[in-house]
Image (cartoon, rainbow, N blue to C red):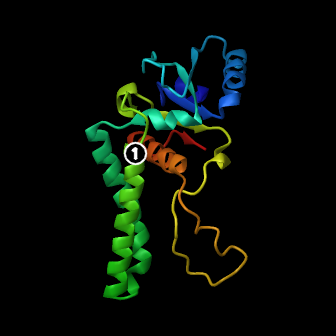
Amino acid sequence: IEQSLENGKSKKPLLIVPKNKQTDWKDEYNLLFPDRNVIIVDNMSKWDGKADNGTVIIASYTALNNLWYSDDAFYNLERTISSINHNRQAIDRYKGDKAREKAKEKQDNENAKILGGAEKGNSKKHLVDKIGIDLLCVDEVHNFNKVFENVYSQTENNEFSGLLEAKSSARAVKLYNLAQHILSNNNSENVYL
């Protein structure tokens, strides 16, 4: 985070951590970089959405429920996700027209579900692009469960069968959307999971 701030690759990094680790992260960051402004905004419900450039913003996982996207940012996010999933559809192109149509319908439904996650939350108080968050770092990302469900696999049944068949986690979908937004606006950089 600090290197990105010093190199000008980031102006407002967001560090998402478990609620019980927010103070620890702030204390450690201040110990290593005493001149850096670090704020804890918890779940962002009481935060005014303002932070000076160069400020490290520390939030809990539940803050994802209070992040939204402006119409322009949502449109760009929609294009990004459709593009990613379009590339995934290339696997199915040799299965025939009927199978391809079914795969396309499935991907369209998945796109809608993922984008729906960008619209869900507690309030539309904080727009990611208006705040200016341009770097995302997540501590203990293993706490975020599946983003995609029913992922297509070409392998037969083995010890990994069923791992990708769980229901999507709303929190993971919100994180995925935020990561895609930051990547698409920062030359595919500034996401650390």
Q: How many tags in the picture?
A: 1
Look at the image and tell me in which quarter the N terminus lies: top right
| 79 to 167, vertically: above or below | above
Q: Which of these two is toward me, 164 or 25?
A: 164
Residue displayed at 44% across by 40% down: 182
Which residue ends up furthest to the top in the rendered image? 35
Residue displayed at 47% across by 19% down: 47
| 11 to 71, vertically: above or below | above
Name the quadrant containing residue 105. bottom left
Look at the image and tell me in which quarter the C terminus lies: top right
Residue 71 visible here: yes
**Dot 1, how many residues are within 10 Å of its Cα: few (below 14), some (14-19), or many (20+)?**
many
Direction from residue 53 to residue 86 in the image, left or right: left
Secondary structure of the residue carrying numbered label 1: helix
Residue 86 visible here: no
Name the quadrant containing residue 132. top left
Which residue ends up furthest to the bottom in the rendered image? 96
Amino acid type, mark 1: Ala
Q: Which of these two is toward me, 129 or 23?
A: 23
Direction from residue 109 to residue 140 in the image, left or right: right
Q: Which of these two is toward me, 80 or 159?
A: 159
Q: Which residue is mark 1?
A: 118
Q: Position of residue 55 (x, y in %)?
A: 52, 19
Q: Position of residue 71 (x, y in %)?
A: 26, 39
Q: Position of residue 80 (x, y in %)?
A: 36, 53
Name the quadrant containing residue 87. bottom left
| 67 to 23, vertically: above or below | below
Residue displayed at 40% across by 72% down: 89
Q: Position of residue 128 (x, y in %)?
A: 40, 33
